[in-house]
Amino acid sequence: MPAEWYPLIFQVFSFILGSAIGSFLNVCIYRMPRDLAVNQPERSFCPSCKTQIRWFHNLPIVSWLWLRGKCAYCHTPIAPRYLGVEFLTGCLFLAIYLRVPPMLLLPYWILVSVLVVATFIDLEFFIIPNELTVGGAIAGLILSGIFPMMMQVDSHLISFGWSVCGAATGYFLLWGVVELGKLAFGRKKLTFPPDTAFQVKQVEDQPVLTVGDESMPWIDLFARESDRMILTVEKAVVNDQSVSALELVFFHDRLEVDGKKIALSELTMVSGLVSKIVIPREAMGFGDVKFIAAIGAFLGWQAVLFTVPVAAVCGSILGVGSMLIGRREWSAKIPFGPYLAVGALTWIFAGPELVLWYAKLLGRY
């Protein structure tokens, strides 16, 4: 075989390996947020009919196209996301092969896999599981100790130290943003027309707040133990007993009304008419804080200081663009995790060059 074919062979191998890994990442994206083990059952199954998929129906990219995006057994459409994740991961693996030295392929392939899974889970469920954030940070620290080139040094110990510094920089930077955001924007006031009905009811052992036709799970309302939600009511009934208070103060685990504290587990039904609700809110989730720590563990503190502003700029561009075309809800529904992933990928493929270009641009003025 001619030697000039070797680069092409390795490039094709990188894409095929990436698309195969992408097939596994689809399993993670589906199972992790649903608290399902990624290895039980071992074989993938159709989300609709639950039939285990045979190997020749599970070939990356090829099978989805061959089956025209449908299950081979129940013929239910399979989301294009499965094809997209496999193709995207294949492209990223190939791009990493072309970008980084061979010795760093393993850690960078692991990192982009974490970025892909975190992005798609966050887009759908607005969470980033600890397996990806905490686990990713631990993996970054270990790999940095094994591969000192990740931190551009020769010493394994120094590389590990810089990895710790990167993780800490990312964590405390966004932690500060979260805390400042809580002080500035920690409450949201909602007003309602007269005679708007509300209720808090246990649904499958989890409270749900319903106001008019809209329902909000309890877990989406409270991020901290100190958070409280205040309902200004015209009248209210708690466990079949009328209350005289004009305000109901809810915490994540209790209701305070008429000088009493009632545990959430003891509430069967709270209902009445509401005119205003003050709900707690966060500038961003703590999953994002841990996510940037994982990115810092892999890429170092310089990457963190690059990734966060790039993520913010990307979010602003999408926000302004969506408003200009009358689709403001597009940006309102996208969490910050995907922007952080974009910022990290930008650093990997062009970050140092962009920083150098910007520094030269500033030097002209």
Image (spheres, rainbow, N blue to C red):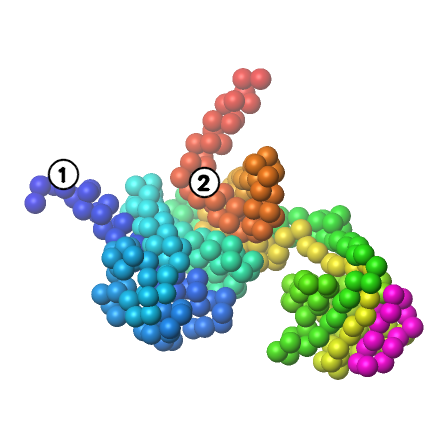
State the CA–CA distance, disc 2 to disc 1.
30 Å
User: Could you tell me which secondary element the residue under label 2 belongs to?
Assistant: helix
Q: Which quadrant of the figure contains the C terminus?
A: top right
Magenta stretch: dominant secondary structure: strand
Disc 1: CA contacts within 10 A as few (<14), some (14-19) or many (>=20): few
User: Could you tell me which secondary element the residue under label 1 belongs to?
Assistant: helix
Residue, disc 1: 4
> In terms of depth relative to the viewer, which is nearer, 119 or 115?
119
Residues marked 2 and 1 touching at CB (< 8 Å): no
The x, y position of residue 12, in whole percent, is 22, 47
> In terms of depth relative to the viewer, which is nearer, 10 or 79?
79
Q: Is residue 106 left or right of residue 162?
A: left
Residue at 67%, 62% (x, y): give it.
214
Q: Is residue 278 left or right of residue 170?
A: right
Residue flagged by tag 2: what amino acid is it?
A: Thr
Q: Residue furthest top?
A: 364
The x, y position of residue 40, in whole percent, is 38, 75
Q: Is residue 91 visible?
A: yes
Answer whether residue 217 is magenta in the image: no
Q: Quadrant of residue 37?
A: bottom left
Q: What is the magenta range? A: 234-248
Q: Is residue 144 visible?
A: no
> In terms of depth relative to the viewer, which is nearer, 281 or 79?
79
The x, y position of residue 105, in whole percent, is 32, 50
The x, y position of residue 219, in whole percent, is 65, 67
Q: Is 362 placed above or below 152 here?
A: above
Residue, disc 2: 346
Residue at 28%, 55% (x, y): give it.
65
